[in-house]
Amino acid sequence: MRQLTAFTKKEFMESTRTGRMPLLVILSVLFGIMNPLVAKLMPWMMEAFAGSLEESGMVLTGIRVDVFTSWTQFYKNTPMLLLIFIVIISGILTTEYQKGTLVNILTKGMHRWKLILSKSISVFLLWTVCYWISFGITYAYNMYFWDNSQASHVFFGAFCLYLTGIWLITLIMLMSSLCSSNYMVLAGTGGVFFLLYLLAMIPDLTKYIPTKLMSSYSLLPQAAEVSDFTYAVLAAAILSVVNILLSVLIFNKKSI
């Protein structure tokens, strides 16, 4: 346990030293501010472009801005934050393959499963900090400008999106144990995500696919129920555990 804790701390220090953690935290703050800001500025932006839109035959009616406008921005922008996060952490193992640093670590007695677990924990914690910072800032501004109580299941909807990130991180770890370059890791992760996204278009499968969690905004205006996401939450949780277990098994047999 002491070895696992020490290596997890090392991963955090490495993330800070390389600038990954500060960059992601700053981006999270910016995204958190941007969501309500865009909502607040939307009437002004629409008025600024009104002339051009009218020339193209589009007529603007009254623009209503409320808490749902800001939460819509949150659910639109968070996948972009998640994509940036995934790209930045995609080399968590492959960079060390290429530098040969894993050999030194493993020859000093570090168990392979502890290495995978410590790296996973460090990325989970980083995503947790980044995501909830962004959510917290958006929530606070929404509470100040509007009324969050107008929206239903705000925290469960946010948890669904957060869990999507956890699932994708475990997929990155699985692909990292299989592949030797971060380009292949990203391609493999993107391929699996796209396949599941296509499967989610089949009505009978939709509720079982983790990608459904990205549509959890529908909970806020009560266009969906919590029960509509139960199976997707379970599927994401189970697949996350399976991905980590497979990562450990594959990495244990991998020649470094």
Image: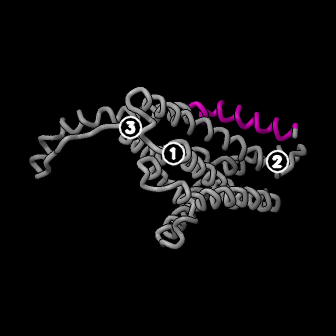
Q: Is residue 76 above or below residue 176?
A: above
| Disc 1 residue type (three-letter) | His
Q: Residue at x 13, y 48 (%)?
A: 59
| Residue located beneath label 3 in the image | 67
Tell which residue pokes out farthest to the right in this image. 109
Q: Note whether residue 161 is visible.
A: yes
| Residue located beneath label 2 in the image | 114
Does residue 14 show up magenta in the picture? yes
Q: Residue at x 18, y 40 (%)?
A: 49
**Occupied quadrant, residue 254:** bottom right
Task: Tell me: 239 left or right of 73.
Answer: right
Q: In the rendered structure, are the residues bearing label 2 and label 1 in contact, judged by CB atoms less than 8 Å apart? A: no
Percent coordinates x, y for residue 28 in the rendering = 51, 35
Q: Residue at x 73, y 56 (%)?
A: 244
Position of the N terminus, as image quadrant, is top right
**Mark 1 residue element:** loop
* Label 1 neighbour load within 10 Å: few <14, some 14-19, many 20+: some
Percent coordinates x, y for residue 120 in the rendering = 71, 47
| Disc 3 residue type (three-letter) | Val
**Mark 2 residue element:** helix
Task: Tell me: 149 left or right of 234.
Answer: left
Percent coordinates x, y for residue 8 in the rendering = 76, 38
Report the coloring of the rendering.
one colour
Q: Nearer the viewer, mark 2 or mark 3?
A: 3
The magenta region covers 2-22
Q: Residue at x 19, y 41 (%)?
A: 62
Distance from Cα at disc 2 to Cα at disc 1: 37 Å
| Residue located beneath label 1 in the image | 153
Task: Tell me: 244 left or right of 201.
Answer: right
